[in-house]
Image (tube, coloured by chain):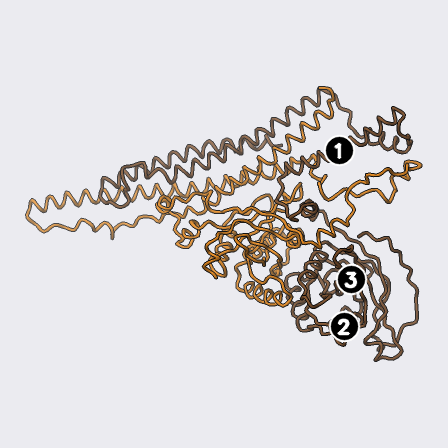
């Protein structure tokens, strides 16, 4: 059975509406701390159906100042691979099985803000999941920040097989990267995601009043009657008129800040590498000098008919510096790419709205 | 599902109950959040085929005086029901509650739900179990939520609290008086975007919907607004043509709405618009340049070595090591150049997005 399953790679992710709501609830309650939890569901012919979820236990950290909040966030971010939580997850799944929930762990979820989630923690969690319990697991990422300014941002990710191999060996040297041809774009594979409603839910949604009535209504006698009319329809859930909000600049600004931060990180990492290369060059120069000296010495000894000294002693005498891991650079590059695309998205909507406002305020131009 | 029921609560003589174990029967108002309802519906779909209804525990928060209950979460509890007896897995209920409390310490037990509108003797039994002292909700009343899930009929939810009833203590243990209480379905600001996506799938045959991008959702919203504006303006035109009945209230309302448009000088708009659009476009341009630079930097970092002849790492000797060092330095130079450019751009980035 496992063999048959392995043959069809995961192609898509289908998320039940229930999971979406649970995820949003958990993420928004935990905000700005990261929220993490477990997903259960089923794998049907390469489509991963996520049918339920539950949050991981919170760790009690008195969140009074910013520093402690950071620790809480870090603990929550590391939760999916903590030992205690694996036990919690197994117990929960055992109980869920009794009430006919699809009792297979299919991954984990986390909340983030403004796409700031590509870091060592995420990678390590997903590696932990993809490596051990079940290879066919995903990470669902819910972006609280982006969802609050418009449409829902929910994405499904997996680590690529190439990256899995590289991460297992934990060697991210230039040499290895050249051999495997791994690029930062290849770290995470995003899977297409759809939302699915059950029949009952569809019928519930149809019951909720949404649209303005189409038939003719009686005229209100005066203005206050109109404003207090109980039959005034609520703004419909779909389409969401919140996305017409004009204040998009804060989000753009925040993304730019994050982008700059990533560039700073990139800069630091590059400095590390340059330092490594300088010291490598220095060591190599020393080795070459030593080798030449030894050669000259040997030539002199050969002329004097003396036994030759070994020429490979430099390997013991000199120690080449260790190349720093390029993993951080890779992740950072991926993060920068993400921010850049996000900025693209924001500017697209921002400029569309601006043109709309302009032509509205300057009619006839 | 918005129900317009109204309730009148009357004080009444209470049935026999142990002294001091009298739960409050004061009316309360209930707020239900969408995740709870969704979860109940999901559970109803997953019920065993031979069971008409399934039950579960409601979790939520209670206001300090206990008059307001917000149902935030729930979980299923296995139970079996026959004509003669009912069995609820109390052990399961207890352990599951403990698990939920670990993840969400603020959500406490507030009551239970059933997926059928029927209230019977067993409902009373279970209700008394949830409202009891110790493990139950005592001294607050347990809330009972029924959600009817009969196919082909409207989904109807009702909320109740209970009062003890019965002539003797034994009778009181397995009976109670269900008192309907009003409830509201409420969703938070954060849930809005999720509900939008979920409800956008309601008219689709396959009941599923992909993630919509910001731009798409903006487009849909604009189309909808244009549609509504069209409707209003056609009405106004009809009134002007004396084809529709005028209404002074509507006229006033429209006038009020129109007067909200700010009066700004055309030149000012032009200037602000140009300044802003330039900022936005510059930010976008820079972000893309940065992306390209990063890509370039990564490629250079890993490509510099292969530009030499063969793989220098496998061979040894002074000459090759030298060229290798040279190559590496070249790579370093390239990257340094790239970074310098980026740094400068980064600094210019700051003011442009204000």
Give the residue number, with chain letter if any, for mark 2. Answer: B129
Q: What is the spatial separation of the Cα atoms under label 3 and label 1, in whole angstroms?
A: 39 Å
The chain letter under disc 1 is B
Numbered tag placed on residue B146 in the rendering? 3
The chain letter under disc 2 is B
Q: Residue at x 82, y 65 (%)?
A: B161
Residue A198 rendering spot, x and y as whole percentages: 67, 54
Residue A238 rendering spot, x and y as whole percentages: 71, 42
Numbered tag placed on residue A17 in the rendering? none
Residue B71 rendering spot, x and y as whole percentages: 75, 59
Residue B218 falls left or right of residue B327: right
- SS type, badge 1: helix
In this rendered view, identify the residue nearer to me: B143 or A72: B143
Task: Tell me the quarter of the picture where residue B166 sits.
Answer: bottom right
State which tag comes first along the sequence, 3 or 2. 2
Residue A45 falls left or right of residue B335: right
Give the residue number, with chain letter if any, for mark 1. Answer: B227
Q: Residues within 10 Å of mark 2 (few under 14, many from 20)?
A: some
**Split into 4 quadrants, where in the image is the C terminus of chain A?**
top right
Q: Are marks 3 and 2 on the same chain?
A: yes
The residue mark sitting in front, 1 or 2, is 1
- SS type, badge 3: strand
């Amino acid at each position: 059975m496992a063999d048959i399953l392995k043959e069809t790679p995961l192609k898509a992710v289908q998320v039940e509406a229930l999971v979406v709501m649970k995820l949003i609830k958990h993420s928004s309650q935990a905000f700005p701390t990261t929220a993490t939890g477990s997903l259960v569901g089923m794998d049907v012919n390469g489509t991963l159906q996520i049918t339920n979820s539950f949050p991981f236990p919170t760790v009690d950290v008195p969140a009074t100042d910013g520093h402690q909040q950071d620790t809480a966030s870090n603990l929550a971010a590391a939760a999916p691979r903590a030992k205690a939580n694996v036990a919690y997850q197994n117990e929960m799944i055992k109980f869920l099985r009794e009430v006919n929930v699809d009792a297979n762990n299919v991954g984990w979820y986390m909340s983030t803000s403004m796409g700031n989630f590509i870091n060592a923690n995420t990678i390590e969690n997903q590696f932990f999941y993809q490596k051990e319990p079940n290879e066919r697991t995903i990470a669902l990422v819910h972006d609280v920040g982006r969802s609050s300014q418009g449409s829902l941002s929910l994405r499904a990710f997996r680590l690529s097989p190439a990256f899995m191999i590289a991460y297992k060996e934990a060697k991210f040297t230039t040499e290895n990267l050249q051999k495997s041809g791994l690029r930062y774009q290849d770290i995470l594979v995003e899977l297409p995601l759809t939302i699915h409603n059950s029949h009952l839910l569809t019928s519930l949604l149809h019951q909720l009043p949404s649209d303005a009535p189409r038939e003719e209504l009686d005229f209100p006698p005066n203005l206050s009657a109109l404003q207090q009319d109980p039959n005034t329809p609520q703004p419909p859930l779909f389409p969401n008129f919140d996305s017409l909000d004009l204040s998009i600049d804060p989000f753009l600004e925040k993304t730019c800040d994050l982008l700059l931060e990533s560039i700073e990180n990139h800069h630091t990492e590059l400095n590390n590498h340059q330092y490594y290369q300088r010291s490598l060059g220095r060591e190599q120069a020393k080795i070459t000098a030593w080798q030449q000296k030894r050669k000259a010495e040997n030539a002199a000894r050969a002329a004097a008919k003396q036994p030759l000294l070994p020429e490979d002693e430099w390997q013991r005498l000199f120690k080449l510096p260790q190349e720093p891991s390029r993993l951080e650079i890779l992740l950072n590059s991926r993060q920068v790419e993400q921010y850049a695309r996000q900025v693209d998205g924001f500017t697209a909507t921002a400029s569309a709205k601006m043109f709309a406002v302009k032509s509205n305020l300057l009619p006839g131009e | 599902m918005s129900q317009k029921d109204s309730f009148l609560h009357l004080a009444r003589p209470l049935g026999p109950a142990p002294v001091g174990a009298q739960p409050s029967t004061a009316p309360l108002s209930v707020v239900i959040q969408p995740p709870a309802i969704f979860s109940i519906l999901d559970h109803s779909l997953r019920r065993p085929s031979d069971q008409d209804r399934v039950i579960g525990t409601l979790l939520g928060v209670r206001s300090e005086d206990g008059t307001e209950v917000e149902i935030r979460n729930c979980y299923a509890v296995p139970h079996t029901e026959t004509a003669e007896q009912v069995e609820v897995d109390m052990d399961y209920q207890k352990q599951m509650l403990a698990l939920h409390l670990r993840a969400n310490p603020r959500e406490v037990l507030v009551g239970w739900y059933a997926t059928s509108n029927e209230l019977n003797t067993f409902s009373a039994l279970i209700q008394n179990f949830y409202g009891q002292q110790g493990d139950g909700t005592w001294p607050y009343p347990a809330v009972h939520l029924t959600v009817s899930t009969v196919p082909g009929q409207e989904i109807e939810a009702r909320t109740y609290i209970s009062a003890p009833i019965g002539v003797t203590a034994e009778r009181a243990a397995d009976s109670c008086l269900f008192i309907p209480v009003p409830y509201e379905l409420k969703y938070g600001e954060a849930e809005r975007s999720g509900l939008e996506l979920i409800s956008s799938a309601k008219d689709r045959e396959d009941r599923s919907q992909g993630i919509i991008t910001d731009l798409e959702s903006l487009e849909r919203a604009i189309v909808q607004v244009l549609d509504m504006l069209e409707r209003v303006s056609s009405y106004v035109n009809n009134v002007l043509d004396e084809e529709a009945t005028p209404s002074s209230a509507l006229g006033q309302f429209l006038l009020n709405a129109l007067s909200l448009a700010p009066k700004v000088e055309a030149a000012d708009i032009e200037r602000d618009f140009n300044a802003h659009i330039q900022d936005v476009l510059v930010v976008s341009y820079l972000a893309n340049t940065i992306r390209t630079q990063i890509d370039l930097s990564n490629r250079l970092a890993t490509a510099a070595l292969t530009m030499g002849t063969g793989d220098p790492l496998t061979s040894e000797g002074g000459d090759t090591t030298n060229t290798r060092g040279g190559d590496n330095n070249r790579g370093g130079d390239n990257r340094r150049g790239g970074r310098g450019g980026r740094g400068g751009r980064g600094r210019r980035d700051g003011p442009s997005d204000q």
